[in-house]
Image (cartoon, grey):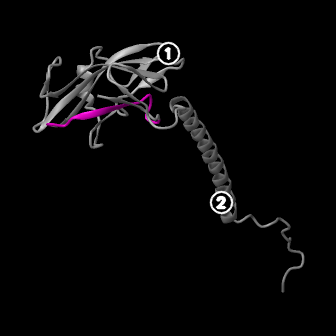
Amino acid sequence: MADSNAPTSTQPAPASPGLTSHHAYKYVAIVAGLFALLFGLILCGFAGWIFQNYATKDSGKPKHSVVNSRNRDGQFTFDVQRSECALQRLDTLPDPFVAHEGAEYCLYVIKVKNVGNQPRMLLLGPQKAKDGGGREFTPDMSASEAASPTRNPFPNLMWGGEDTTVAIVFEVPIGTRLAKLKLHDSPWSKGVEVEV
């Protein structure tokens, strides 16, 4: 027979550990989600700033000009001062560059000026050349840097009003006749086409 004078417990049962951990995980997930959202907003804002500062406002088809005339894309003007093609080697220091078998070099010496108020990065990658059939060629980075009169490396930061002279070298199949250079202020600009 049960003792009626035995003390009875009035304290509540302890909370389930599983329930507590569930709430903790939910709280961590919410905080992590907020941080991810904030990071995404910051990243989008930075991407917008990059686009606004480096994309040009030009529209329509690229402009056409002839060699030795000043051509503008965005904040840069390009003045093609010299061009040579059908070169088997470039006599650069400390070592010459020799074209691969079945190829030759086309070299263009270009004066570039930043005519805007903001600093701009002169990049080699966006610059292109096209032959009469529309085939597109990209510059040889090492040969271009070695052949540049100022020996300035790419990328080259140019302040407003500053100018520099660079060489852009393309390695093309022997017999290729390049018809145009397409020169750019930035990778996102329309570019200016210069007939060569």
Residue under numbered circle 1: 160
Label 1, secondary structure: give it: loop
Disc 2/disc 1 C-alpha distance (Å): 59 Å
Of all residues, the one furthest to the right in this rendering is 5
Of all residues, the one furthest to the left in this rendering is 101
Q: Quadrant of residue 94?
A: top left
Magenta span dominant secondary structure = loop
The answer to whether 94 appears left or right of 193 in the picture is left
User: Which residue is located at x 44 percent, y 28 percent?
Assistant: 185
- For badge 2, the amino acid type reads Ser
Label 2 or label 1, whichever lies nearer to me, is 1
* 97, 109: nearer the viewer: 109
How packed mark 2 is, by other alpha carbons closer than 10 Å (few <14, some 14-19, many 20 or more), is: few
Residue under numbered circle 2: 21
Quarter containing the C terminus: top left
| Residue 67 lies within the magenta run | no
Figure label count: 2
User: Which residue is located at x 63 percent, y 45 percent?
Assistant: 35
- Give the magenta part as a residue range: 174-188
Name the spot of residue 46 as percent of width and height, x first.
57, 35
Name the spot of residue 56 as percent of width and height, x first.
52, 31
